[in-house]
Image (cartoon, helix red, strand yellow):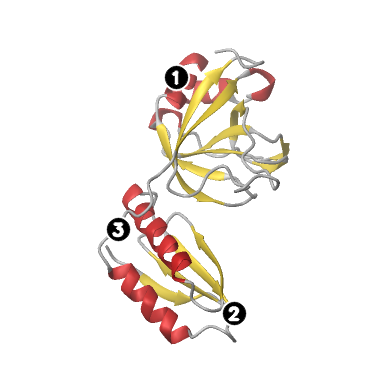
Amino acid sequence: MTWRITMTGDAAVTVSFPPRIDPDISARVVALADTVRASGYPGVRDVVPSYHTVTVYLDPIRTDLDRLWTALEEAAAAPLDPGRSPRDIVVPVVYGGEVGPDLDEVARFAGVSPQEVIRLHTQRRYRVYMVGFLAGFPYMGTVDARIAIPRRATPRHAVAAGSVGIAGEQTGIYPATAPGGWHLIGRATVEPFDPGRDPPCLWRPGDRVAFESVMAGGGR
């Protein structure tokens, strides 16, 4: 698999793999990020994986950039070692109604009933590709192509915490109330991010998430 390393400003290095949503690329990204974290390079401040990149933030005064660069080259070129096992997480969701105001629109887009949208959304396990935008926001994929509706033309000023949305191939959960342009189909009953929890984020890249339809109040 091809890759390249570039400087991202004067205090970060980015390893880039082919730019697409792909579980094999994600597996390499996750493994590389885990390797860098475990290595304990002096001066490394943070390691951030995304869909196809790993960015290493560093203290340019304390970091031996040549040594880090060589280590990243070796790690990127090495055979894939899956490392840690992905976790399976089940997320109960109340679909439709006030908490899923775009469910009918997604159904019209797909040419199916709202109940079929729910079935299609809950029948898959989704890979967490990255966490960002808001603390604890999981970018997951991929949804069934029939319900892969593009982002809204006009974003909402405020999307409620816990809202489950679809944007193209992706599905995600808003961990806090914030502006957003994803189509909202329901509300999760979990807290994606809790600063008082250890770890505070419910998921990490590489985890697998399944959605489960429940009634308001917790019934199935």
Q: Is residue 170 left or right of residue 181?
A: left
Q: Residue at x 44, y 76 (%)?
A: 6
Q: Are marks 3 and 2 in contact (CB under 8 Å)?
A: no
For the N terminus, give its image quadrant: bottom left
Residue type indicated by callout 2: Asp
Above or below residue 7? Residue 165 is: above
- Spatial distance from mark 3 to mark 1, Cα to Cα? 34 Å
Q: Is residue 153 left or right of residue 6?
A: right
Q: Which numbered disc covers residue 59? A: 2
- Spatial distance from mark 3 to mark 2, Cα to Cα? 28 Å
Q: Secondary structure at mark 2?
A: loop
- Spatial distance from mark 1 to mark 2, Cα to Cα? 48 Å
Q: Residue at x 71, y 34 (%)?
A: 160
Above or below residue 108? Residue 74 is: below
Residue wearing tag 3 = 81
Can you tell which of label 1 and label 2 is closer to the viewer?
Answer: 2
Q: Residue furthest front?
A: 198
- If you read the primary sequence from the N terminus, does the residue marked by circle 3 or circle 2 appear first? 2
Q: Secondary structure at mark 1?
A: helix
Percent position of residue 190, x then y: 62, 32
For the C terminus, give its image quadrant: top right
Residue wearing tag 1 = 119
- If you read the primary sequence from the N terminus, does the residue marked by circle 3 or circle 1 appear first? 3
Percent position of residue 210, x then y: 46, 30
Q: Which numbered disc covers residue 170? A: none
Q: Residues within 10 Å of mark 1 (few under 14, many from 20)?
A: some
